[in-house]
Amino acid sequence: MIFTYISHVLLSCIIFSHSVARIESFTPLPRYSVSSILVDSKLYFFGGWGKNPDESEGCQNSVFYLDTLSSFSTLDNNIPWIDLTSIANLPVGTCWQVSAHDSQKNSIYILEGLMINSSNQVNVSDTLVYSFDTKIQKWSKSMISGIAPPRRMELQISQDSSNIYMFGGLSGPLTGSQNTTWFNDMNILDIKSLSWLIVVPSGIDLPPPQADFTATILNNGMIVYIGGRQATNAYGSEISYKQMNKIWTYDTKKSFWNLIVTSGTIPGVRTGHSAVLAMDGRIIVYGGKENEELLSPATPDLAVLDTASTPPFQWSTPKAFNAPPILAHHSATLIGNVMIIAFGNVTQQTTVAPGPTSKVYLLDISNKSNYTWITSFNANTLKPTSTTEQYEDSTTTYSIKPIQPSDKVISLNIALILGAAIGCTIAFIIIVIITVLLLRRWLKYKQSSENKGLSDISVSDN
Ligand SMILES: *[C@@H]1O[C@H](CO)[C@@H](O)[C@H](O)[C@H]1NC(C)=O
Ligand SMILES: *[C@@H]1O[C@H](CO)[C@@H](O)[C@H](O)[C@H]1NC(C)=O
Ligand SMILES: *[C@@H]1O[C@H](CO)[C@@H](O)[C@H](O)[C@H]1NC(C)=O
Ligand SMILES: *[C@@H]1O[C@H](CO)[C@@H](O)[C@H](O)[C@H]1NC(C)=O
Ligand SMILES: *[C@@H]1O[C@H](CO)[C@@H](O)[C@H](O)[C@H]1NC(C)=O
Ligand SMILES: *[C@@H]1O[C@H](CO)[C@@H](O)[C@H](O)[C@H]1NC(C)=O
């Protein structure tokens, strides 16, 4: 009995030290233009533009995730980050890239953006697609058939379960090509056959070449392209900010472009912003800049496009108090009713210094009349009632499955482990001493009660 008890204490000691190491051992370095994707409750982050070990800045090859099954507070340093870089770093340094997910093959794809060859520091120009197997945590280069479109950056992609839709963006020396080119082509990567398809879109009007927009796919298969910049031709002549009162949409079912005129309170222009889709059809747009040179923030920082209102595509610009600093090139993911904003570039001096950040901010979007920036993420209220929920949007795949067995790989903080080990050893010694004392007492008691019992028997015998 006592040994079972001791083993229980030791076991909880080990589990405790393990979870402490899990939660507090790793904080990613500041960065922006990372790509992120939610797969089975793990919010993965890849690469991004950030500081190298030698203090210079560049594209990173890091891989880590945020465990959304754990509750956390953004005020404490307990964000449940799990690092995978030491065992599964990206084969190239990447930033401004995009990611997509194939649940059938347990694969996350990383494509486009800047990819820097680690061995010779050359900016890769080939349209390589790397895939990350989330089960075995290994990278491989995907063999993709068809004609690959030129590598590009400053775009967002959309996906459904069968296709990745890649529109627009721009290429230049950063993406390994000689000249700057602005794109307005639609390219489809068939996820099942891993092939680039040739698309001939139709529409009353076709969109001009553009970049720096967000792409959000609605449940009806329509992709909504919000904000960014446009050019009058592929050479990037006459670049202008896209007004937010007219929105290009692409119907993936009919390969059809449409320019939708919105109503409501029209927000200001923006690039480097984020957009997530709520269950009820609202697109929550956050952050970004309204001027590439001055880096002035988009106004207002929060704008909501309701695609399900009557009439549809109505803008509103709700106020939310305690907003984060002015951010651009951050990542945004909706989990339940909480929008998780992570990383990004603080473009202007506010309460925090400008430059890349690794901070996390949370916006509660549950109440349409009261958007609230919150500081705690409660995983318990977000757990699904049914076994599997699936929800897809432009930047993320909302997909929470029953709790998976914990990861094999954990980055351990030696100091914490050592602390926990010493603590556990001391606890163990104390338990042993107490046990020995109790045992001695019990033996004494047993002896005296046996004597008593004998006398009792002798009494009853009388
Ligand atoms: C990186 O450079 C090396 C040496 O030049 C080359 O062998 C390799 O194929 C390059 N990798 C990529 C992804 O371009
Ligand atoms: C390649 O990318 C880096 C960023 O990692 C950039 O500083 C450099 O200018 C790029 N090279 C060329 C030739 O544009
Ligand atoms: C790049 O631009 C130059 C000058 O405008 C032109 O001569 C050259 O053909 C272009 N290269 C490519 C690959 O388009
Ligand atoms: C990021 O912010 C810093 C500081 O304001 C600025 O110098 C830099 O140009 C910004 N980069 C981008 C891509 O916005
Ligand atoms: C909005 O919600 C927050 C938190 O739920 C609450 O503290 C605040 O009073 C609400 N604001 C209004 C105007 O009702
Ligand atoms: C939403 O917020 C408004 C304004 O603060 C409040 O009057 C309303 O009761 C809230 N609704 C819910 C469901 O909490």
Image (cartoon, helix red, strand yellow):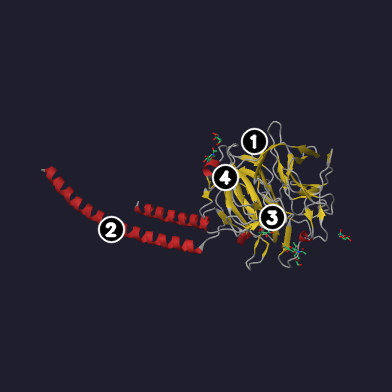
**Residue at (50, 64) in percent of width and height:** 414
Amino acid under label 1? Answer: Asp
Disc 3 residue: CB within 8 Å of ligand 4: yes
In the image, 456: left or right of 367?
left
Residue 51 or 292: which is nearer the viewer? Answer: 292
Q: Which circle marks residue 437 in the picture?
A: 2
**As shown in the figure, which amino acid type bears the numbered disc 2?**
Leu
N-terminal of the pair, mark 3 or mark 4, is 3
Of circles 4 and 1, the one toward us is 4
Judged by depth in the image, the label closer to the viewer, 1 or 2, is 1
Q: Secondary structure at mark 4?
A: loop
Q: Residue at x 59, y 48 (%)?
A: 323
Marks 4 and 1, how far apart in space? Answer: 23 Å
Residue 240, image x and y in percent?
78, 49
Find disc 3 in the rendering and name its residue. 295
| Disc number for residue 280 | 1
Give the quadrant of the C terminus.
top left
Q: Can you tell which mark lies on residue 321?
A: 4
Q: Which mark is residue 221?
A: none
Q: Quick check: which quadrant has ligand 6? A: top right
The type of residue carrying mark 3 is: Leu
Is disc 4 in contact with disc 1, using a CB cutoff of under 8 Å? Answer: no
* Camera-side mark, 1 or 3: 3
